[in-house]
């Protein structure tokens, strides 16, 4: 390309840049508007952190009160055979705005798992003695009206909660099976025992083939569900030799992602060879003994699943476990004639317990009862172990949304000389809604790009604008690491560690940020304040203010000397103001004041707001956050020159608008406001937030396949005008491609008619060969990001003999009681499931303005030249036409969201992220007594009992049993 042509291209680019900026400034009236900087102080973060601390601490004293009453009530009541089951269903349920469902404050309610007989003596006894908690719960609610669910979860599976509420809405969940068991809830698991280092040892010898192996696979999956994020786990299978089931060479954190990987690996275990217990246990002890890996460093346990055998592996236990620090739990799986003595002695001689799983019905019960054994040291530790623990974020089973829960274990202290004296009665819990916590972190105080976030000692976020699980399962905690919620870099890794360690301070960082629509990346400066608040010895909440520095949170405001009085004098009445301006006002749906609610009619809302401001006293912060309202009122008076019609609609300008921090968008003319499609909430508007990270003129093409115009975020809407913006003469249109792309690689303008209906489309799909070279020349840089909260279509099982279009349930499905639901239920559950998706974002990283190169293949090439348009987010590219070199077409570049397996789990396991577990560990106590280690008839259900339970389940699923929810 000759020098003359290059100079000519540069001249075109400069002229386009001048014309676009001039048009934007003139049409928008920017000269009459100024930017006002907002100064943010660390005291804002400190104040919010203190508010969260006070709010979350309030329920703690009430939990202690409930704990004391539980201990007293359990001492008063003793087991009796004359108990009766007195139940009634209250008729005073009323809709409650706090719980978002019908509740009754006159009683408590009880939930009993489907697979537990609610007429048993043990259940009836617990129904009786826990009934007195009703008065305790009611008193707590009177003392603190903000309290939400108060729950006592029993070790037998009974859950009593206040206020009472129907467990299931029959109109929404007809014929669906209730699989809820309080002992499987995240808050119960974390409160019932200290953290665990668990090694699951699976017998994969030839003798376990068939149904026994399938039972083992399902039992291991159920066992994994009893672990929380404070636990560590791995699975080892063995026959002649032992090996890890998955790619994890060490124990890994028992988070949702790792447990799913282990479950898949367990399904791939096959049976062959002979049993070698010594080899299996040797591998297990070696895994637990590794010191250079991240661990829970508390309860060390081995779970053996086998069909039985003659070997006791005594020499291995003497070598690796002579001090009995590792507990051994053994599970005899399937129906067989092996002597149970050898594997029972393994458990008895190593402070464990022996269980039998002869069939489906015994799996759920026997894979969770080991928690009773692990709870013994906590019971014997007495007062030292009675410490409040805060859970990870999870979805409330009663539709309260995302919550965290404070828990305390409740111990049996009836008789210290009986086995029951070292058992946990259950766990007391109080919920705190994340929505309530969010209200303590005022969103509109430091600009659209600023936000609060809080993390727990695991590094998981409790508060973060990106914590938005689309379809969380109530069985699983909602765990999103801070580094997954944002774009990870070395500085953020350091900030995360300092926050977990409780260090205070502020950090100014330059970081990549996703745009609101998540298709672009922006480079912005951020200032973070970190203020830790210690809630208990168990958990800490760290509040951090994330904001852009001045001039972040800038707002465009009329030159009115910042005086609301002056604004009022200019706007004596809303009607005359609106008529004079001939504009349309688009307010957001913010809850500006507690007693001023948004209305569907924008005009009526703004008029009511003006009247409201006149009625309120400025110095009354309780009734209304006056500073926010004052800002809104000032923004309402923002207007274009006194005669906005004097700004001519030239060069295809369709409308002008001003968007403000106060949540008001003014559009001229009024007719354009009626069809305003942008987000009315400016704090969630992509163009508004993008503009605050730089001083550029941001041009945003509308999404592909729409007929709307190009949006310029400085306040103008441009239509497509071939004559004005076509840089090349029509003579060369057939041989030259001229395009304007934005900073994300999306098409804004082109001289080619066949491109005009693709405005807003990613250019890598339209011309992949050229786009790839633009990346290689560093004009564009790309970054792949993961979304860990996406929804995908589930993968259906296709290994069965039936047609691929027919869903053939596996044994795991049949073992899950929910499989017996109707076909309609099955289709609903199979509709969507949580998954990981990957998206590629492109952005300008290089500061260079000019780029050129040649693309092509053997006998064909294309020359291109690219010029960035200064002070904008655009680049002008001229190249030989794509159709002149069709034989060199490459595969389209993928930019949009795609299903993904996420980062390599094996690599993550070898490089675990920094975390801190609970400070206290209760894994051993000299006062612990051994009253048996399993095998007795009373502790292991008989075959006939299990058959009876399964028949009961089938009867329940036929719709003949009343709901498991039993108000009392």
Image (tube, rainbow, N blue to C red):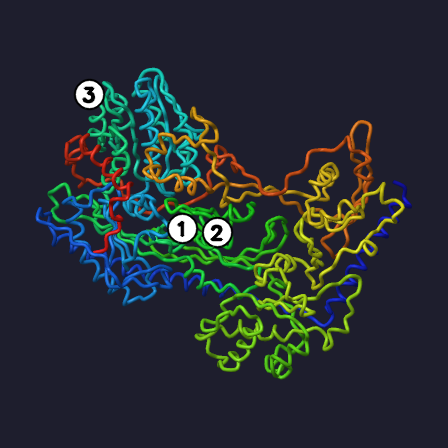
Q: Nearer the viewer, residue 384 or 250?
A: 250
The CA distance from mark 1 to mark 2 is 10 Å
Q: Position of residue 286 (x, y in %)?
A: 36, 27
Task: Classify residue 667 as left or right of residue 149.
Answer: right
Whether residue 393 is visible here, answered yes or no, is yes
- Does dot 2 land on a helix, a strand or a loop? loop
Task: Classify residue 220 as left or right of residue 89.
Answer: right
Q: Residues within 10 Å of mark 1 (few under 14, many from 20)?
A: many
The image quarter in which residue 695 lies: bottom right
Give the residue pinned by disc 2.
Answer: 467
- Of mark 3 and mark 1, the one earlier in the sequence is 3
- Of mark 3 and mark 2, the one earlier in the sequence is 3
Question: From this viewpoint, which residue is outermost toward the top?
Answer: 273
Verify CB contact (< 8 Å) between mark 3 and mark 1: no
Task: Classify residue 223 as left or right of residue 509.
Answer: left
Q: Nearer the viewer, residue 416 or 71?
A: 71
Residue at 24%, 19% in the rendered image: 309
Verify CB contact (< 8 Å) between mark 1 and mark 2: yes
Quadrant where the N terminus sits is top right
Give the residue pinned by disc 1.
Answer: 393
The CA distance from mark 3 to mark 1 is 45 Å
Q: Position of residue 819 (x, y in %)?
A: 35, 37
Q: Residues within 10 Å of mark 2 (few under 14, many from 20)?
A: many
Quadrant where the C terminus sits is bottom left
- Of mark 1 and mark 2, the one earlier in the sequence is 1
Q: Residues within 10 Å of mark 3 (few under 14, many from 20)?
A: few
Q: Nearer the viewer, residue 592 or 548?
A: 592
Give the residue pinned by disc 3.
Answer: 339
The CA distance from mark 3 to mark 2 is 52 Å
- Does dot 3 land on a helix, a strand or a loop? loop
Verify CB contact (< 8 Å) between mark 3 and mark 2: no
């Amino acid at each position: 390309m000759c020098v003359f042509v290059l100079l000519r291209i540069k001249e075109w680019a400069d002229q386009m840049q001048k014309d676009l900026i001039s048009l934007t400034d003139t049409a928008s009236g920017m000269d009459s508007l100024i930017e006002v900087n907002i100064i943010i102080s660390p005291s804002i973060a400190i104040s919010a952190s203190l508010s969260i601390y006070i709010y979350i601490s309030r329920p703690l004293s009430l939990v202690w009160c409930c704990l004391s009453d539980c201990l007293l009530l359990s001492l008063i009541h003793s087991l009796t055979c004359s108990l009766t089951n007195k139940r009634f269903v209250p008729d005073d349920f009323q809709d409650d705005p706090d719980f978002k469902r019908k509740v009754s404050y006159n009683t408590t309610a009880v939930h009993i798992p489907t697979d537990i007989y609610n007429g048993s003596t043990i259940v009836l006894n617990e129904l009786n003695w826990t009934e007195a908690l009703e008065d305790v719960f009611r008193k707590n609610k009177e003392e603190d009206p903000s309290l939400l669910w108060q729950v006592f979860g029993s070790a037998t599976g009974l859950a009593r909660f206040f206020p009472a509420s129907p467990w299931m809405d029959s109109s929404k969940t007809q014929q669906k099976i209730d699989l809820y068991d309080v002992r499987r809830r995240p808050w119960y698991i974390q409160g019932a025992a200290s953290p665990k280092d668990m090694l699951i040892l699976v017998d994969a010898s030839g003798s376990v083939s068939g149904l026994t192996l399938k039972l083992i696979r399902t039992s291991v999956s159920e066992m994994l569900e009893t672990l929380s994020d404070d636990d560590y786990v791995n699975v080892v299978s063995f026959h002649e030799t032992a090996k890890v089931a998955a790619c994890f060479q060490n124990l890994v954190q028992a988070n949702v992602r790792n447990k799913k990987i282990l479950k898949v690996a367990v399904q791939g275990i096959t049976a062959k060879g002979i049993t070698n217990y010594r080899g299996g246990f040797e591998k297990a002890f070696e895994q637990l003994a590794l010191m250079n890996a991240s661990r829970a460093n508390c309860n060390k346990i081995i779970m053996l699943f086998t069909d039985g055998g003659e070997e006791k592996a005594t020499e291995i236990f003497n070598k690796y476990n002579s001090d009995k620090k590792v507990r051994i739990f053994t599970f005899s799986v399937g129906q067989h004639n092996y002597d149970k003595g050898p594997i029972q002695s393994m458990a008895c001689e190593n402070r464990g317990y022996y269980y039998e799983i002869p069939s489906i019905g015994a799996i759920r019960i026997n894979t969770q009862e080991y928690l009773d054994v692990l709870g013994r040291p906590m019971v014997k530790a007495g007062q030292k172990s009675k410490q409040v623990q805060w859970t990870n974020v999870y979805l409330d089973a009663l539709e309260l949304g995302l919550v965290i829960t404070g828990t305390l274990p409740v111990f049996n202290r009836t008789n210290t000389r009986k086995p029951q004296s070292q058992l946990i009665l259950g766990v007391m819990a109080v919920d705190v809604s994340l929505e309530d916590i969010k209200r303590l972190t005022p969103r509109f105080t430091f600009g659209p790009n600023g936000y609060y976030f809080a993390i727990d000692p695991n590094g998981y976020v409790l508060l973060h604008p990106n914590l938005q699980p689309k379809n969380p399962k109530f069985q699983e905690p909602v765990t999103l690491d801070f580094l997954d919620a944002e774009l990870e870099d070395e500085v953020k890794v350091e900030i995360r560690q300092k926050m977990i360690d409780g260090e205070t301070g502020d950090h100014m960082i330059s970081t990549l940020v996703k745009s609101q629509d998540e298709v672009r990346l922006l480079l912005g400066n951020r200032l973070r304040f970190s203020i830790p608040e210690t809630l208990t010895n168990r958990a800490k909440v760290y509040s951090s203010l994330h904001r852009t520095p001045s001039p972040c949170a800038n707002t465009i405001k009329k030159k009115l000397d910042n005086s609301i009085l002056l604004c009022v004098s200019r706007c004596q009445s809303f009607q005359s103001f609106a008529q004079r301006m001939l504009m349309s006002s688009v307010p957001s749906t913010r809850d500006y004041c507690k007693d001023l609610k948004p209305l569907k009619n924008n005009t009526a809302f703004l008029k009511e707001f003006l009247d409201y401001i006149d009625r309120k006293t400025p110095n009354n912060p309780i009734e209304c956050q006056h500073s926010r309202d004052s800002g809104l009122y000032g923004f309402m008076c923002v207007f274009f020159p006194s005669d906005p019609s004097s700004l001519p609609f030239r060069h295809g300008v369709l409308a002008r608008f001003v968007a403000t921090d106060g949540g008001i968008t003014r559009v001229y003319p009024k007719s354009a406001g009626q069809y305003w499609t942008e987000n009315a909430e400016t704090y969630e508007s992509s163009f508004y937030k993008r503009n605050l990270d730089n001083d550029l003129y941001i041009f945003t093409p509308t999404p592909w396949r729409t007929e709307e115009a190009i949006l310029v975020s400085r306040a103008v809407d441009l239509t497509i005008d071939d004559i004005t913006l076509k840089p090349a003469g029509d003579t060369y249109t057939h041989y030259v491609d001229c395009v304007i792309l934005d900073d994300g690689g999306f098409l804004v303008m082109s001289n080619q008619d066949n491109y005009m209906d693709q405005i807003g489309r990613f250019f890598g799909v339209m011309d992949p060969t050229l786009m790839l070279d633009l990346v290689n020349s560093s004009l564009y840089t790309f970054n792949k990001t993961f979304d860990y909260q996406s929804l995908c279509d589930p993968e259906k099982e296709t290994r069965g003999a039936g047609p691929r279009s027919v869903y053939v349930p596996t044994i795991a499905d049949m073992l899950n009681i929910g499989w017996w639901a109707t076909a309609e239920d099955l289709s609903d559950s199979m509709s969507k499931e949580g998954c990981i998706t990957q998206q590629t974002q492109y952005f300008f990283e290089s500061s260079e303005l000019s780029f050129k190169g040649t693309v092509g293949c053997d006998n064909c090439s294309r020359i291109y030249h690219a010029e960035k348009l200064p002070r904008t987010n655009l680049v002008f590219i001229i190249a030989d036409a794509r159709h002149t070199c069709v034989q060199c077409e490459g595969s389209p570049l993928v930019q949009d969201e795609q299903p993904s397996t996420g980062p390599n789990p094996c690599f993550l396991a070898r490089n675990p992220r920094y975390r801190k577990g609970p400070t206290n560990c209760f894994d051993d106590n000299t006062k612990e007594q051994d009253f048996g280690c399993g095998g007795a008839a009373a502790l292991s259900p008989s075959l006939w009992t299990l058959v009876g339970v399964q028949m009961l389940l089938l009867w329940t699923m036929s719709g003949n049993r009343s709901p498991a929810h039993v108000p009392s």
